Image (cartoon, rainbow, N blue to C red):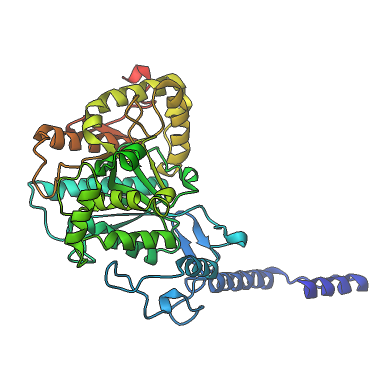
Amino acid sequence: MAGGASSEAAEGKKGAAPPRPAGRARDALVFAAGVAAAVLALALLGPASSALAPGRGLVAFPVPGPADGPRTFYDDPELSYEAVGGRRVAGWDAKRAAWLRSRGLLGGGGRHRVRERVVMVSGSQPEPCRGPGGDHLLLRFLKNKVDYCRLHGVELLYNNALLEPSMAAYWAKIPAVRAAMLAHPEAEWVWWVDADAVFTDMDFSLPLAKYAAYNLVLYGWPKEVYERRRWLGLNAGVFLIRNCQWSLDFLDEWARMGPASPDYAAWGKTIKAALSDRDSDVACDQSALAYLLLANRERWGDKTYLGTDYYFQGYFAEIVGKLRGVAARYEAAERAAGPGLRRRHAEREHLAYAAARNAAVRAAVPGPDGGGQRGWRRPFVTHFTGCNPCGGRRNPMYSRELCDGGMRRALGFADDQVLRAYGFRHAAPLNDTVLPLPFDYPAARNR
């Protein structure tokens, strides 16, 4: 500090240094200075004025407690978390930006000081599953999501409460996603993933830069939706939605076509008449979503990314029969890549090794990153739509072996990727027994 520098200069001009304490007196002063520094650090960086970011240690930005800090949108008594019947949120972009700025998370030009944050939302019904083994399968599906989120720094919100009782089953996602946006203003994206979807590529990260111009990301075919007017031209089981005013307005419009609306029956007839392949006059979430994009493409469709460039969510019947072949090709690519890629490493180093593995596999295994209908790359997400493991009433077009065996194969395939950091893998695709991995796996001599 300036005062200290002036004092030292004055002492220097006098030609004599200040006397040094000797022995125990000096040690006592050093100890006292250390205690003072520690107390000062706790005062400045303690819970009242700092936040603990997962995996990043203390972050020095202010975190107001209940009795201090600037007023935010949370202090508005008319703020409603309800998807239907509550007051619509207005001015959300400005309110969210003000909150981020007050927490030191928004820099100049409105840019985030940290990477774009993603909150994954998933869930299941509040009561036990009716299907045999359904609760166990839901637990394994949940573990799969926990694993992916841990490896990629994604926060997971798993909800089993009906936030709007009349919006059950597939409609329940809308109130949950809307509430998550308000509860997590720090998140740039909210990512809905159905309970029966499995992450089958633990290395793949969302290509968020690709979606910079969009607010909603869906798996589907634009021609099927916009030209052929088909509700099966997209899938609503996995979607990524930006935390912004556009999205809140979109969710409000989507929800008002659901069972909590007094116009639900009328909307079902309107949607059936508008879509070429809808044979029911009872609206579901997916048919309502297709109708929204089709009926007002300029407002909703132009800000929606609809594509099949990778398995953002892949149809399980196309995938499960290929998983053994996919695993064999990845092992061959790693054996050819050299020992560096096969080094044992800490789980927290997963993303660096994932990037290196993807680079090696990209040159050796056909198909896009994240998998696709062609090629042999790992599918990012395998969605068991129609298998209904919790409800127990499987779509009759699928055999028990295809659904039950397929779910076990996909979960084991994904789990092997996670277990590798712990030195194990499953003995076989449908075997729950695990075996220790040999050193330098999967080198040719260890096959």
Q: Looking at the image, which residue is at 42% across and 79% down?
A: 75
Q: Position of residue 185 (x, y in %)?
A: 43, 64
Residue 96 vs 425, above or below: the answer is below
Vertical arrangement, residue 291 with respect to residue 7, above or below: above
Is residue 300 visible in this depiction of the protein?
A: yes
Q: Nearer the viewer, residue 411 or 206?
A: 206
For this rendering, which residue is in front, 200 or 20? 200
- Tally of numbered discs: 0
Displayed quadrant of residue 19: bottom right
Give left or right: position of 412 versus 118. Answer: left
Taking the image as shown, residue 152 lies to the left or right of residue 86, namely: right
Q: Quadrant of residue 228?
A: top left
Give left or right: position of 200 versus 56: left
Q: Quadrant of residue 369?
A: top left
- Spot occupied by residue 97 in the image (x, y as percentages of width and height): 51, 66
Between 400 and 335, the residue placed more toward the observer is 400
Q: Where's residue 148, x and y in %?
A: 34, 45
Q: Is residue 381 above or below residue 358?
A: below
Quadrant (top left/top right/bottom left/bottom right) for the C terminus: top left
Please tell me which residue lies in front, 166 or 189: 166
Q: Is residue 433 visible?
A: no
Residue located at (43% from left, 35% from top): 354
Quadrant where the N terminus sits is: bottom right
Task: Name the residue furthest top.
Answer: 445
Residue 77 at x, y = what percent?
37, 81
Does 260 sit left or right of 396 as displayed? right
